[in-house]
Image (cartoon, rainbow, N blue to C red):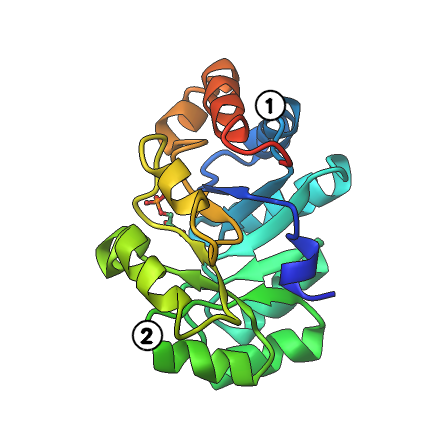
């Protein structure tokens, strides 16, 4: 299945940085409780892979993705850990070859129309736009919609409770991602009540998450 199919109906993807591997499972349960159905664990900390493995094994009802994918080796590792989908801020031929060989549903990143078209040529109609707010935000995505009608975007980077609804309102936005739902400091404090409140507010922005 493609990432667009796997994430179909999922509108909000919390992007998380895991410093404490024991926090991943309670975090995933908290997000599910709050009405969200996906989590993207970024490959930026030593415990990210263990977190993906634990969530995949212990919280099967959540879609667990691996974020910040950059190398073919990481693709193999996250596939083996049980990731349901992968996300990258960009793409390279080597990375695309690796995700296709591994059969990993993948959301590659694009910022320019040429990057989007190259990915579309390879069948990726769901693409990440990162860093969304710096790349031009809502206005930029709106402008891309008309000449690139086949592309659906997952903007991330600078999205928060204040602007999430503006992104979600765009016809070419399939889902949004961001760390505002489960910020690193709240995770460090294991403040799952606070995270549940933020996640529930995010889930209330859409009715099918
Ligand atoms: C990502 O990997 O998508 C971003 O780090 C998320 O960006 P944010 O921290 O601004 O939400």
Q: Which of 127 and 75 is in front in this view?
A: 127
Q: Which of marks 2 and 1 is in front?
A: 2
Dividing the image into 4 quarters, which one contains the N terminus? bottom right
Which quadrant would residue 198 be assigned to in this image?
A: top left
Calculate the distance from the C-alpha at mark 2 to the C-alpha at mark 1.
35 Å
Say if 70 sits above or below 123 in the image. Answer: above
* First of labels 2, 1 by sequence position: 1
Residue 168 in view: yes
The image position of residue 50, as x and y in percent, is: 61, 46
The image position of residue 183, as x and y in percent, is: 39, 31
Give the SS element for disc 1: helix
- At horizontal 65% and vertical 46% (from top left) the residue drawn is 9
Dividing the image into 4 quarters, which one contains the C terminus? top right
- Residue pointed to by mark 1: 34
- Residue pointed to by mark 2: 112
Say if 189 sits above or below 98 in the image. Answer: above
The image position of residue 109, as x and y in percent, is: 43, 67
């Amino acid at each position: 299945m493609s990432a667009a199919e796997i994430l179909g109906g999922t509108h909000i993807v919390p992007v998380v940085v895991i410093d404490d591997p024991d926090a991943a499972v309670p975090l995933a349960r908290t997000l599910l409780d709050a009405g969200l159905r996906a989590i993207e664990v970024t490959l930026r900390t030593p415990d990210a892979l263990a977190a993906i493995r634990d969530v995949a094994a212990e919280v099967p009802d959540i879609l667990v993705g691996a974020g910040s994918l950059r190398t073919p080796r990481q693709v193999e590792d996250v596939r083996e850990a049980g990731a349901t989908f992968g996300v990258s801020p960009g793409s390279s031929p080597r990375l695309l070859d690796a995700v296709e060989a591994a059969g990993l549903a993948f959301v590659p990143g694009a910022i320019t129309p040429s990057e989007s078209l190259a990915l579309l040529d390879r069948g990726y109609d769901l693409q990440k736009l990162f860093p969304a707010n710096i790349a031009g935000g809502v206005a930029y995505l709106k402008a891309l919609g008309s000449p690139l009608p086949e592309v659906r975007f997952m903007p991330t980077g600078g999205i928060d409770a204040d602007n999430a609804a503006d992104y979600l309102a765009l016809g070419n936005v399939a889902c949004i991602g961001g760390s505002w739902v489960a910020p690193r400091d709240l995770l460090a404090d294991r403040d799952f009540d606070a995270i549940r409140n933020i996640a529930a507010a995010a889930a209330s922005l859409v009715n099918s998450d």
